[in-house]
Image (cartoon, helix red, strand yellow):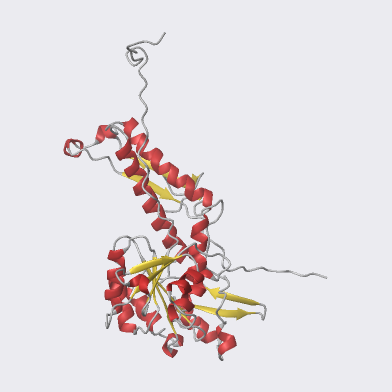
Amino acid sequence: MALKNVLPLDPVVNIIVNLAAVSATRKKFNLALLMGDVGTVADFANKRIVTYDSLNAMLQAGFTTEDRLYKAAALIFGQRKKPPLVAIGKVGSEEAPVKTVQECRQADSEWYVGIYCGDITDAQILAVQEYVEACTPSTMFAFTTAEETAKADDGGIFGTIKSKGYRRIIGQYSTAHKDAICAAIGWAMGAMSASTINSAFTLAYKREVGVQAENYMQTFTSNDLNNIKKNYGNVYVNRGNFYDVFEEGRVGDGSWFDEIIYLDKFKNDMQLGIMDLLVNASKVPQTEAGMGRIKTAIKEVCDDMNRIGFIKEGVWKGEDLMALEYGKVLPGGYLIQSELISEQAQAERDARNAPPIYVSLKIAGAIHHVTIQVDVNR
């Protein structure tokens, strides 16, 4: 017999199902932006930036194999490690490069490395970099120069960038390809696409598919190479007749490109991890337990950095910090500490601010040079 009125089960057994909000999409830091003349390609009628997943897609859109942007994209997609996408940015009529970079940054926040594929002077590179150093979100700029001054003792544009301490720029000297740096950046973006165990990388000694080494192209001496490298420029050379290699992966102030990109990713992932916690939790209590939840979110990011091989167990050789002393081993390559809730100033508590949290990282680094002593005795 059918019941005329079915009474609900909720008063007896009340089940509450909570589905967490979707986490903010993590940047993979694997998208390069090539800026240049897009001609009459229809995709750009009302857009500043369009992304493509292949060279065929660019051809179908209206690019030709002779277009500079196509040739630059061929270097991005042609490396042994290659990213899934490349972004193309439109240069406006009679528009200065810095304006193009600014407009592209406003149009799309996902690209990480920008490359201007067009004529650009040293002064224009410096104008771009003045903006890039301070823009948000974190960005890198890459360029190629064939200027003879780059091989001089003062390094030309490399020396000027070095003197200004610019960190978010990487340059390559090349007479082989107008946009040779695209090959190194394509490799890096491909490596950032993996995010698998021990996938952390260095740009040193990588093959630039599609680019000829400088000492194939011209008389290129050890002195030329040393002048470029001491001013933190990069160059593609042949070593020992068998090895065509990119040397050496430094950015403008002498830091390593791989360290900059992974620290940017670390900051980004940590911000998103903590934001996810604050959004999805009913509240994070202003207690040590609440601080523990925040530190757990940070730990997840640190563990990921350890998994890919960017940080590893090592001896801390920095300044003493709370319980961390010089010479102490960081087992996972990191230590997370925070000041006590009980010692927090009342004004900070009233403002609902967390006590300061300190994350100490031991970067795994990379070996670029090896010295071996062989002693022979008869």
Expressed as whole percent of the image width and height from the top left, the position of residue 44 reads 34, 72
Residue 288, compared with residue 265, is above or below; it is above
**Measuring 39% from the left and 58% from the top, which residue is drawn there?**
264
Is 297 in front, or is 326? 297
Is 287 in front, or is 307? 307
* Residue 103 falls in image quadrant: bottom left
Q: Residue furthest top?
A: 1
Is 164 in front, or is 87? 87
Can residue 249 be seen here? The reply is: no
Expressed as whole percent of the image width and height from the top left, the position of residue 172 reads 46, 78
Q: Is residue 373 left or right of residue 91?
A: right
* Residue 166 falls in image quadrant: bottom left
**Measuring 27% from the left and 70% from the top, which residue is drawn there?**
102
All told, the count of numbered labels is 0
Residue 136, compared with residue 231, is above or below; it is above
**Measuring 28% from the left and 73% from the top, which residue is drawn there?**
130
On-image quarter of the C terminus: bottom right
On-image quarter of the N terminus: top left
Q: Which residue lies furthest to the front in this view?
A: 1
Expressed as whole percent of the image width and height from the top left, the position of residue 127 reads 28, 77
Q: Which residue lies furthest to the right in this view?
A: 378
Q: In this view, does 78 lie to the left or right of 157?
A: right
Is 175 in front, or is 329? 175
Q: Is residue 217 left or right of residue 19?
A: right
Can residue 51 be seen here? The reply is: yes
Expressed as whole percent of the image width and height from the top left, the position of residue 58 reads 46, 72
* Residue 15 falls in image quadrant: top left
